[in-house]
Image (spheres, rainbow, N blue to C red):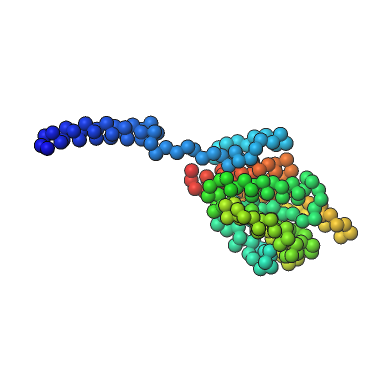
Amino acid sequence: MRLNLIVPALVSVLVPAVFLVLAGWQFGWLGASSPAAPYASVFPPDESFQFDPPPAGSYDLPVIKQAPDGRVLDIDGQVRSLSGITGGKVSLVSFVYLTCGDVNGCPLAMSTLFDIYYASGEIPGLRDRLQLLTISFDPERDTVEAIDAFAYPIRNDGEADQRVPWQVLTTAGQTDLQPILDGYGQVVDRAPDQDSISHLLRIYLVDGRGQIRNVYGLGLIDPRLLMTDVETLLMQESGT
């Protein structure tokens, strides 16, 4: 076939194809991906939540203060540095005691963290950027054996590799515990003749540099709010 016949034939095929590619890029037909759903969308609506959180990234989370370091014990009884655990990832940190019976206390915090834990598998890549930490403020009863038993469903979760890590921690005693509580501002009032421990319900949002960025109390323990703040913080850290 002669060249003067080949060239017009190629042009007649290539020009429309190039036009379609360029138009696809221009109008989003090609290479477009649906925007990621907000983290909060993985939680079903619940009438008990008093308000809807604002859109992620529409507000700032300023630094409140540096979270304290301290010596803690993990479920294997290994001594760990708390700042070594929180460094490098965003953390949701809760303080509890495992025998708490106040439905508006530790069980509420635990229920919220379990909601976040199980829903986190629906958010791609989140397990590499977020972790959950639960620290007992009752080391006399919440021994290594006790926290290991509590963590059983987490350790034996067949889908744990798809969900955010969750570490349950205790301390060797009050000497190690108190500076951690003081540094976070977690109020705990022990009555020596009572089994229950009076305390303020708190969950803390800590960034990858170990800085406290928000504190949640009763009325704000809403998984949608917590995860919207997590998403906002991750957006701030990535500059998006």
Between 51 and 20, which is closer to the camera in this rendering?
Answer: 20
Between 72 and 212, which is closer to the camera in this rendering?
Answer: 72
Q: Vertically, is 193 above or below 215? A: below
Q: Could you say where residue 199 lies in the image, as x and y percent from the top left?
A: 78, 51
Residue 146 placement, left or right of 80: right
Q: Could you say where residue 156 lies in the image, as x and y percent from the top left?
A: 65, 58
User: Residue at position x 60%, y 57% from top?
Assistant: 86
User: Residue at position x 33%, y 31% from top?
Assistant: 23
Q: Quadrant of residue 216?
A: top right
Between 18 and 109, which is closer to the camera in this rendering?
Answer: 18
Residue 5 placement, left or right of 237: left
Q: Is residue 72 visible?
A: no
Q: Could you say where residue 197 lies in the image, as x and y percent from the top left?
A: 82, 54
Q: Is residue 70 visible?
A: yes
Q: How many marks?
A: 0
Tell which residue pokes out farthest to the bottom in this image: 78
Q: Could you say where residue 190 lies in the image, as x and y percent from the top left?
A: 82, 57
User: Residue at position x 69%, y 46% from top?
Assistant: 112
